[in-house]
Image (cartoon, grey):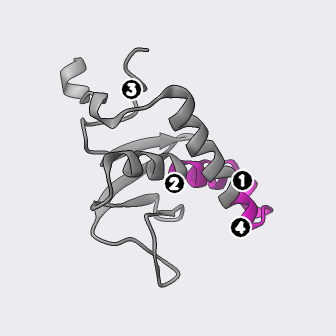
């Protein structure tokens, strides 16, 4: 299997900007993301177009969390999030992230930077 998607910006570092249905989201690794006052592995703020990923997690966990949070961003940007129960949305994006990781055998160590592909 070849190198997976061009949308992962840097080897072992997922920070950068991602296009979500035409909206640009900024992704940053932070010490401890919080959602409603609770610790989280990642958060997605669709109003600010920002995603935060917990920096101390393993690369595999960070990648799965990024895909998960991009799922939330996609649902919000599509307009589906307005009528969707939050629990249902969470189940969908969690299942999608796990499916992507398992089926594409995504390995963060093999992610190339955009500069090295140019």
In whole angstroms, how far apart are the C-alphas of marks 2 and 1?
16 Å
In whole angstroms, how far apart are the C-alphas of marks 3 and 4?
30 Å
Residue beneath disc 2 = 69
Residue beneath disc 3 = 6
Categorize mark 2 by other alpha carbons within 10 Å: few (<14), some (14-19), many (20+).
many
Q: Position of residue 34 (x, y in %)?
A: 43, 76
Secondary structure of the residue carrying tag 3 is loop
Q: Quadrant of residue 83?
A: bottom right
Indicate whether residue 109 is drawn in magenta.
no
| Label 1 vs 4, first from the N-terminus | 1
Residue beneath disc 4 = 86
| Label of residue 79 in the image | 1
| Label 1 vs 3, first from the N-terminus | 3
Residue 87 is left or right of residue 42, and the answer is: right
Secondary structure of the residue carrying tag 4 is helix
Pointers 3 and 4 in contact (CB under 8 A)?
no
In whole angstroms, how far apart are the C-alphas of marks 2 and 4?
13 Å
| Label 2 vs 1, first from the N-terminus | 2
Residue 107 is left or right of residue 86, and the answer is: left
Q: Residue at x 54, y 34 (%)?
A: 102
Pointers 2 and 3 in contact (CB under 8 A)?
no
């Amino acid at each position: 299997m070849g190198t997976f998607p061009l949308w992962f910006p840097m080897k072992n570092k997922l920070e950068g900007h991602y296009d979500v249905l035409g909206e640009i989201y900024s992704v940053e690794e932070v010490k401890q993301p919080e959602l409603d006052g609770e610790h989280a592995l990642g958060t997605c703020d669709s109003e600010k177009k920002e995603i935060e990923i917990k920096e101390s997690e393993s690369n595999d966990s960070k990648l799965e969390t990024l895909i998960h949070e991009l799922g939330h961003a996609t649902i919000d940007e599509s307009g589906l999030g307005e009528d969707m129960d939050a629990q249902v949305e969470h189940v969908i994006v969690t299942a999608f992230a796990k499916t992507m990781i398992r089926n594409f055998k995504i390995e963060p160590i093999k992610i190339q930077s955009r500069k090295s592909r140019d």
